[in-house]
Image (cartoon, rainbow, N blue to C red):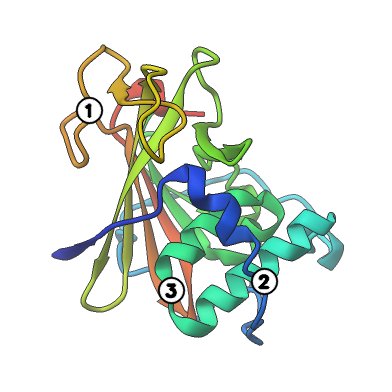
Amino acid sequence: MRYRPRSITHPAKIAALLLLTAGCSSAPPLAGDDKAQPASIQPNATVAKTAPPMRTPQDSAPTTESDRLILQQIKSACKIGNAERFVNAFVASAAVRRQYLAPEVLYSGPGASGQVRLLAADYDRFPIEMFDYYWRPVQPRSADEYVEIVMEQSQDDRIAIEWTRVRYDGHAGEGDGLGTPFTLDGKPYQPGGPYSDGMLLFEPAKGCWRLIEDIRYAASSAP
C-alpha cells in the first residue's frame, strides 16, 4: 500500500494536545465490532489458542480522570478526522486504547510463529507508552531509551506508524528538551531509516480508526 507522508508532533508537545478536550463525538468503542475484518490479516494467520479472559464493561471503561480526558481527546480527534491527535491519545492511555482495537490484531515478530491473530481481549503487546509526556518503549533496556515515530496516512485513510528506539544526546536545542536522537547503536536517527523496530497499522472504522496489525522488525523490540 502506498502512503503519503504526514508529519507528527514531537512527543514533547503531546502535553498540549491532551489539553484539547472539547468536542466529543458519539463514536462507540470499536473492540466489540465483529463485522469488519482487517484487510491486512492473511487467511492463513494463526488465531491465538488461549481462552480470552472474562471481561465486563467496566474492564474497558476509563478508570481515572486522566483516562477520561484522553477519551475526550480521542473522540474529538475522530470527529474532526485528525489522525495525529488520534495516535497521540491512543498511545497515552491503555484503558482508552482497548476501545480502539480491531476484534483481532495481527501480530508478527519475536515470540510468534509467523503471523498470529490475537483476539482484542488477549492483545497485550502494544510496544509504546507515554512517560512524562515523552514516548518510550514499554520494556526499555536502559532508562535513557525513548521512541521516535514516523506517521504516514494513505489515500484511503489508513495509518502506518513506524517506530524506532532512540537515545538523545542531552544537548537541548530550540524546542527540544532532550537533544538530538541517535539509534541504539550510536548512529544519527533518520526518520524512515533502516533501524526501525516495528510498524503499527490502523484502519478506518466507525468514523475513527482502530489498530489492526503490530509488526516487529527486531528481536529487541518485543515488549
Residue 37 in the figure: left or right of residue 102: left
| Secondary element at tag 1 | loop
| Residue at x 49% of width, y 37% of height | 127
Q: Is residue 121 above or below residue 74?
A: above
Where does residue 195 sit, x and y in percent of width and height? 22, 28
| Residue at x 38% of width, y 70% of height | 203
Residue 148 in the figure: left or right of residue 33: left
Mark 3 or 2: the one toward you: 2
Q: Is residue 75 above or below residue 117?
A: below
The disc labelled 2 sits on which kind of residue?
Thr
| Residue at x 28% of width, y 21% of height | 183
Q: Is residue 69 above or below residue 170?
A: below
| Secondary element at tag 2 | loop
Q: Residue furthest bottom?
A: 26
Image quadrant containing the N terminus: bottom left
Residue denoted by label 3: 82
The disc labelled 1 sits on which kind of residue?
Tyr
